[in-house]
Image (spheres, grey):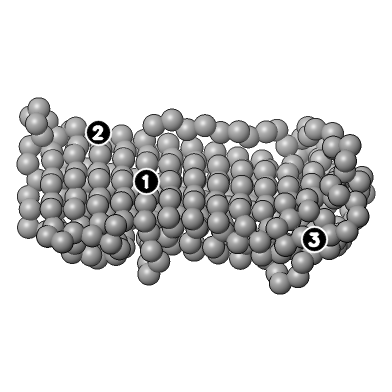
Amino acid sequence: MRLSFSLFPVLALPALSALMAPLTVAAQQKVEIHRAAAPNVSVRIGGAFSSLKVSAWPSDSIALTGAVGVGSRLDGGSINRTGPVTGMKFFVIATENASIAGNRLELRVPRGARVWAKAGSADIEVNGVAGGLDLNIIGGSVRVTGKPTELIIESMDGSVSFTGFTDYARVKTATGDITLFGGGEDLSFSTVSGNINGSNGERTIARARFESVTGSITFAGDLPRGADLRFDTHSGPIALRLASSRVDIDAMTHTGAIENAWSSERPIAGREGRGMELGVSSAGSSARVSIRSFKGNVSIRP
């Protein structure tokens, strides 16, 4: 498994585009920016903030509020200067790390907006945005609730949680935990040493891949017809709780053990005399589950 990250330093940020109208907030001032916007406006915000809350609202407008502390400033503005904006960019610049804690912002956007956010150690919370989301942090946390059409999250140490439904998701962490309570059409969750906890609840899940190196993977849910789930780990344990009785299971470990309390089939020794294998074929099966583990143990329960 290969993970890639594209994180940037938060104390030195590039100059604003020549197309952007300058908008600077002095130290110890409130942030209060309001602009009419297109329903699918694109908003980019990055830099040295400690907290960002993004919410969708019924207005075709953008509102950025909050405050920046001593030693910090907010630069940015709209890309098109007349009429409802189609794009806005904001950068929070801090001259010293101590000032970042006071940089707390709240962004309200039209429901169909696309939001891009990138920070160092920050807590990002997104609610109700139906457009695309691209969120990137080093530490802190990311929490997303809603039905975005696209969800991309990268984190080094920060935890990530998603509640809702999305057509497409790619979530990666190094040591941060990942929590899923929802579903989607094409989902991928991967971590190095973080733990992945997933449940689709009553939401449909079509295709999903869960990958870890040393972190544990747990999943509980009822898989619908045609669902295809894959679980891969090097040495982390995998624990599944499946509500549906119509699932084809193909499980294999190199040295780990497999425990099956979900059906009457018993695992057998691996083909090379090491590890274990389990194959379950259900009559009229409607879902497929593939499990691969090198050293981690596998547990399947109802």
Crowd class of label 1 (few under 14; some 14 to 19; many from 20; radius 10 Å)? some
Q: What amino acid type is highlighted by mark number 2? A: Phe
- Mark 1 and mark 2 in contact? Answer it, CB < 8 Å: no
Look at the picture and state if 126 lies above or below 116: below
Q: Earlier in the sequence, mark 3 or mark 1?
A: 3
Which label belongs to residue 37? 3
Q: Residue at x 81, y 40 (%)?
A: 94
- Between 155 and 37, the residue placed more toward the observer is 37
From the image, state whether disc 2 or disc 3 is nearer to you: 3
The secondary element bearing badge 1 is classed as strand
In the rendered image, residue 7, in percent from the top left (x then y), is placed at 63, 34
* Separation (CA) of disc 3 from disc 1: 36 Å
Q: Read off the residue under disc 1.
A: 209
Q: Earlier in the sequence, mark 2 or mark 3?
A: 3
Q: Quadrant of residue 75?
A: top right
| Left or right: residue 100 compared with residue 225 | right
Q: Residue at x 55, y 46 (%)?
A: 153
Q: Read off the residue under disc 2.
A: 294
* Separation (CA) of disc 1 from disc 2: 17 Å
In the rendered image, residue 151, in percent from the top left (x then y), is placed at 55, 51
- The C terminus is located in which quarter? bottom left
The secondary element bearing badge 2 is classed as loop
Residue 67 visible at all: no
From the image, state whether disc 3 or disc 1 is nearer to you: 3
Q: What amino acid type is highlighted by mark number 1? A: Arg
Q: Earlier in the sequence, mark 1 or mark 2?
A: 1
Extreme top residue here? 272
